[in-house]
Structures are given as structure tokens and as C-alpha cells.
Amino acid sequence: MSGRSRGAWLAVPLSLWLLVFLAAPLAVVFAYSFFRRGAYGQVEVSFQLGNYARVFDPLYLGIFWKSAQMAVSVTAAVFVLGLPLALALARAPARWRTPLMTLLMTPFLSNFVVRAYAIKVLLGIEGPVAALAGGVSYSDSAGAVWLGMLTNYLPFMVLPLYVALERFDFTLVEAAKDLGASDRLALWRVILPGIRVGIVSGALLVFVPALGEFLIPDLLGGARTMLLGNLVTEQFLKARDWPFGAALVMLLVVTMTFCFMGQKRLERAEASRG
């Protein structure tokens, strides 16, 4: 069997997998977004656009905007912290890269909920931060949510940056310095443009889940921090308004689709340039 025929046969189960586990559930959610919530929480099958009209209510748009701000700030902070770490990994001797990468990924051997509760204990009234701050607790706040996302999503930025930097030709940096460029200018004009595909990939790996995150805000934010992921969860589990929850999900899906379309466009531009 030729390579082309083998690829065609492999495409069949992959297409079926995407159809059953991605396209079909998404189609069900899309259909539910046009239905109506009954008086007792049941779903009434009647086509209407009222759920999408509610999505654009200023109250819910405010929650979406707050979630987007949180996701952007987390993405920016993770990039600022992750770039030096990825540079250190890429420039480290080959024998040290695997141990350093293992240290980076070791926290992920624990459960996601355990890591979130660790932040809660750290910032709680009986934690070390409160002891240093004179008994002031910083848990159940937007800052705790931000820190929880930062610590959990940092590797999602470091890994794409590391892959891009590992392929980067650092002799270009040496050439820029020979021409009089400072370290900061070489970083800004040589390294960052050369790894922008990795930057965009890492940013999407952080921004997309952070925009729809619900567990960290629920555990660390308390009742005062309502983000889009929490709003969707409440519609399905507490308010029992599945049609409106489905409309909110579709808003997230559309936003994420535009993000990934932008990434693919950048990758095609880089491929044609190279």
C-alpha cells in the first residue's frame, strides 16, 4: 500500500472520530440554542432567537468583557514569565534540557483541583501570605483567580516558545550584536519576529481555555467573581436554562474559531515567506 493510500485510510477513522465526538455534540448544542426553557426547566422545542438576544444584554456582555480582560491579562503575564524560561531551556546544554523540562512538568502530575486548592491555601487566612500581610486573606478574589490561572497555564506558553526557540538560529542574534544591537534590541527585532508563530500558538493555548475557565474562578473567586465559564455552568446546572447556556457556548465557539483562523492565517503567511 502506497503512502497516499495509507493516508487516505487513516483519514477515514479520524474523520469519523471528529464527526462523532466534535461535530455531532456541537450540532446538538447549536440546535438547543434556538429552543426555549419551559416553566419547570424543561427544554421546549420551538425555534426562536431570544437566547441570542439575551447574550447581547449589557449584563452578559459585561461578563464576557470581564472574562476577556482576565484571559488577556493572564496570557500577557504568562508570556512575560514564560519567555525567559523558554529561552533558558533552549540555550541550556542538551544534557540539562530533559531534567529542566521534567521539573517544569512535575506539578502537572497532581490533579488540577489539587493545584487550585493549593493556591487557595496559600492565599487563605491561615496561609503564609496572610501571615506576612498581617492576617489579610487574598483568597476568594479576582487576584486569586488570576494567580491560579497564571500558575496552571504557564507550561502551555513555555512549551510552544521552547519548540520555536529550539529551531531558531541564534547566530542571527550574534550578527545583530556585531552590528551594534543591544540585548534588548536583538530580542525585540530579531528573536521575537523569528518565533512569532510559537508566540501566537502559546497565546492561543492560554487565552482560549482561560476565556472559558470555570473551575478556577469557582474555587478561588468565590461568589464575587463571575466569569463566562461560571455563567455557562450555572445555566446548565443551577438555572436549568439549557437553551440560553447553549447560546453562550456558541458565543465562545465563535470567538475561539476566529482566534484559530487568525493563527492558521499567520502560519500560512510564515510558510509562504519561508
Image: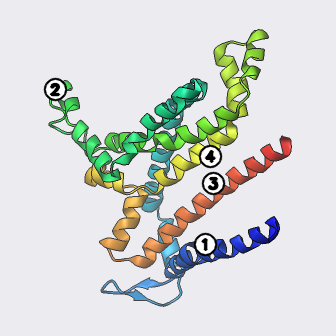
Query: Please, is residue 40 above or below residue 76 in the view?
Result: below
Q: Secondary structure at mark 3?
A: helix
Relative image position of residue 227 (x, y in whole percent): 40, 55
> CA gap, disc 1 to disc 4?
22 Å
Q: Determine whether, in the image, residue 134 is placed left or right of residue 171.
A: left
> Picture quarter containing residue 59?
bottom left
Q: Amino acid at mark 1?
A: Leu
Looking at the image, is mark 3 or mark 2 earlier in the sequence?
Answer: 2
Residue shown at the point (48%, 54%) measured from the top left: 209
Disc 1 element? helix
Would you identify the image quadrant in which residue 251 lies?
A: bottom right
Question: Residue 228 versus residue 96: which sits nearer the camera?
Answer: 96
1 or 2: tag closer to the N-terminus: 1
Question: Of label 2 and label 4, which has the lower sequence position?
Answer: 2
> Of the numbered discs in the image, which one, if any, rests on residue 201?
4
> What residue is disc 2 on?
134
Quarter of the image for the C terminus: give it: top right
Foreground of the two, 25 or 225:
25
Q: Tag 3: Cα neighbours inside 10 Å, few (<14), some, or many (≥20)?
A: some
Indicate the amino acid at tag 3. Answer: Cys
Q: Amino acid at mark 4?
A: Ser
Kind of residue at badge 2: Gly
Considering every residue shown, the one lying at the far bottom of the view is 45
Residue 18: which disc? 1
Q: Is residue 146 left or right of residue 27?
A: left
Given contact means CB atoms under 8 Å apart, are the residues at marks 3 and 2 in contact? no
Tell which tag, 2 or 4, sits nearer the viewer: 4
Residue on which the image places disc 3: 259
Q: CA distance from mark 1 to mark 3?
A: 20 Å
Q: Quadrant of residue 135?
A: top left
Q: Is residue 199 above or below residue 234?
A: above
